[in-house]
Every structure is written in structure tokens, then in C-alpha cells.
Image (cartoon, helix red, strand yellow):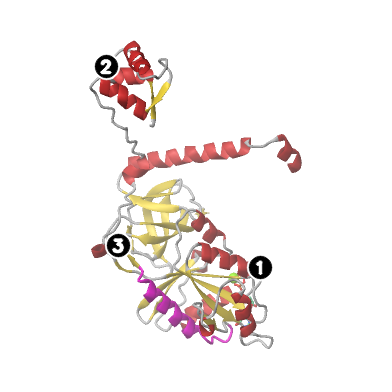
Amino acid sequence: PESITVGELALRLKATAAEVIKKLMANGVFASINDEVDFDTASVVAMEFHAKVEKEVEVTIEEQIIDDSEDTDADLETRAPVVVVMGHVDHGKTSLLDAIRHTNVTESEAGGITQHIGAYQVNLDGRMVTFLDTPGHEAFTTMRARGAMATDIAVLVVAADDGVMPQTVEAIHHAKAAKVNIIVAINKIDKPGANPEHVMEELTKYELVPEEWGGDVPCIRVSAKQKTGIKDLLEMILLVADMKELKANPNRAAKGVVIEARLDKGRGPIATMLVQNGTLHIGDIIVAGTSVGRVRAMASASGKEIEAAAPSVPVEITGLDSVPTGGDTFNAVSDERLARQLVEQRRTAQKEELFNSRTKVTLDNLFEQM
Ligand code: GTP
Ligand code: MG
């Protein structure tokens, strides 16, 4: 607190309010018992009483239980890149992801991939890449808004026969705002009307200058349908990932972001989460937005039951007491009681926020809505 009432100050100084008021007056401050004085004024008076007023530091539950300490270089280990595929409707995002999965030469869990998880891992000659299959840009936008950017690289899919469209532009803005590396996949080059050069020309209007024209944006020509250019795209993803030297500390409490979540009739809330730092274990107590609980079961993107998930690994978990929101951050914590308190606090704050936003209806906008 930056200020204190005269009465409270007197209490702390073990003096009477009258004595404090007198001292204040001597210093040119005219205040009554219920008035507030600022920290500096309080200090001056306290010094006269030969005491020192220490600034009170309020430690929130959040700070008490969420370990946000920085990792030292020695703690850090290389982690897989996290790639999001974005682009205009029908430009071939899903087809491209399918093609990537099938070109995935060392795929050991073929056929087991569940589409609904919204995230999966591909093994490229022993190197893992995590892909986020975010339908629309919604999850991406909320993640960015909450400063929990989960992705390192954005693959921008542009159909060679259609060119840059409104949602392409939107995706460019999102990727730029999030400061992720953009790799352009010019798709559908098999189509008769395909014109990759025209696409590249259009991209320059948005300050995306292709590498082959002296810029820094890799543009890879692909056909998701004929599965051409896929290897080049994957190699480019690995190259960009190498340059970024992506690292995390697997030996700390897990933290990350909720990709998506839903309620299952039998199993309760199910959340797909991406671990961004630390390792998530079965039995961990986690706080995810306004949800809390112990990780009961954990499955990999391919549906396999797993015990632990390292950085960049997407998992599906059960055990939360409610359904979190996509884009929420999550943290593994050690104190269940405090975790529940924190969630209560967040729920109250959320309700207040909702209430305040509702009451901000003016006569004008009330009539506009009718
Ligand atoms: P939304 O999820 O609806 O935004 O679409 P999307 O971007 O995921 O596109 P999707 O992969 O569903 O492909 C849209 C259409 O384009 C489908 O009919 C695909 O078969 C077709 N398509 C995708 N890639 C190619 C390609 O390389 N060549 C050709 N000829 N068609 C393609
Ligand atoms: Mg799709």
C-alpha cells in the first residue's frame, strides 16, 4: 500500500492520533484521523517518533505457489519446435498437415493419431516437431492476448491459384504480432491456375519478402494433394528451429498453455495442453486458468497413455475440476490448498469482471442493442 490512514499510523507507532496529527501539522500537513497520508509523509512522522515505516510487501497466492524463477543456461536443454499452420479457408491447411504426417518417414505410431487433440508430434529422422492444428485463429489469438505464445514458427498456407485472401492477411498480422518466424507454403501448385510468383508478389505488400528475392521469408512450393515439396517444407522448419536454438528446462515444475478443452460425459473435463517448460507428471496438482485438479490420466497426441510430458510435448489430460479455456496458462504447483484458494480468487475476479462489463451499459448502447 502506498498510503496509510492517520489512525493506523498512530497505532503502529504506539502513539495517540492526536500526537500524530500534531506532528503532521508541524510538517505542514493538515489531516484528521481518517485521512490518508502517503508513504513519504508517514516516514517523516515515523522518524520523529524514532521508528521506521517499512513498505509492506503484499505477496499474492499466485506468487506464493507459482514458480516463475528464471532457468540458468546449465538447466536448459534443446526442445522440439512448436509449429502452427495458418491460412485462408480451403487453402489446404488440413491437407498439408495430413501430407506431413504421411511423409513422416519414421512415424512409429501411424494410424493412432487422433484428430481431435488439435496437436501432434512428428518424428523427422529422430527429431521431433510439434504441430498445432488450431481450427481458425481463435486459440492462437487468445494465447497471444495472454502473452502465452505457444508457438515458435507459423506455416502460412497460401493457395497458388487463389493468392493472398482476407484470412491470409489476418494470419500474417497474428504471426507478426506474436513475433514468430513465418514460413510460407505455397500450396496447390499442381492446379492449372497456379501462379506462385503472383502469390510472392502479393506477399511483398505485407512486408514478407521471399528469400529467393533477397528477403528473409522462405517460400516453399508444395502440393498437399500430390505430396510434393513436403520434405523441403519440413527441412525448412528444422532449419529455422535450429537457428532459434529453442531450449527449456525439463527439471522443474511444468508450465504451459491449454490448447483446447471439453467436457466428456464419462471422464469429466479433458484438456489438451502444451507443456512449455518443465515436465508434467501424473499426479501433479495443476492450476489452469480457473480450473484446478490433479492429473489423473495423461495421453500423448497419438493416444498412448504416458506418465510424463517434457517441454514442447502436447498431452491430453483428465483430472481438472472444470473445463479450462483454450489459451489459459497452466502451472504445476506443490500446495493443493493454496492452489484451490488461488482458483477461488481468480473465479471471484472473473465474476466481478463479468459483472462490471455488464453494468457498463449506457442508455445509448442499450437502445442500440434493441
Ligand atoms: P479450412 O479448414 O476449411 O480452412 O480448409 P483447409 O485450409 O484446411 O483446406 P483443406 O485441407 O480442407 O483443403 C480444401 C480443399 O482444397 C480440399 O478439397 C482439398 O482436397 C483441396 N486441396 C488441398 N491441397 C491441395 C493441393 O495441393 N492441390 C489441389 N489440387 N487441391 C488441394
Ligand atoms: Mg482445415
Task: Please name the residue that numbered disc 1 is placed on.
Answer: 166
Q: Which mark sits nearer the N-terminus, 2 or 3?
A: 2
Task: Please name the residue that numbered disc 3 is placed on.
Answer: 249
Q: Nearer the viewer, residue 91 or 6?
A: 6
- Placement of 6 over or under 75, stated as above or below: above
Task: Please name the residue that numbered disc 2 is placed on.
Answer: 14
Q: Which quarter of the figure is the N terminus placed in?
A: top left
Q: Residues within 10 Å of mark 3 (few under 14, many from 20)?
A: many
Question: Magenta-highlighted stretch: main secondary structure?
Answer: helix
Residue found 32% across the figure and 12% down from its top: 19
Q: Which mark sits nearer the N-terminus, 2 or 1?
A: 2
Q: Is residue 232 magenta?
A: yes
Q: What is the span of residues highlighted in magenta in the rendered image?
A: 225-246
Indicate the amino acid at tag 2.
Lys
Q: Secondary structure at mark 1?
A: helix
Q: Which quarter of the picture shows residue 342?
A: top left
Indicate the amino acid at tag 3.
Asn
Q: Secondary structure at mark 2?
A: loop
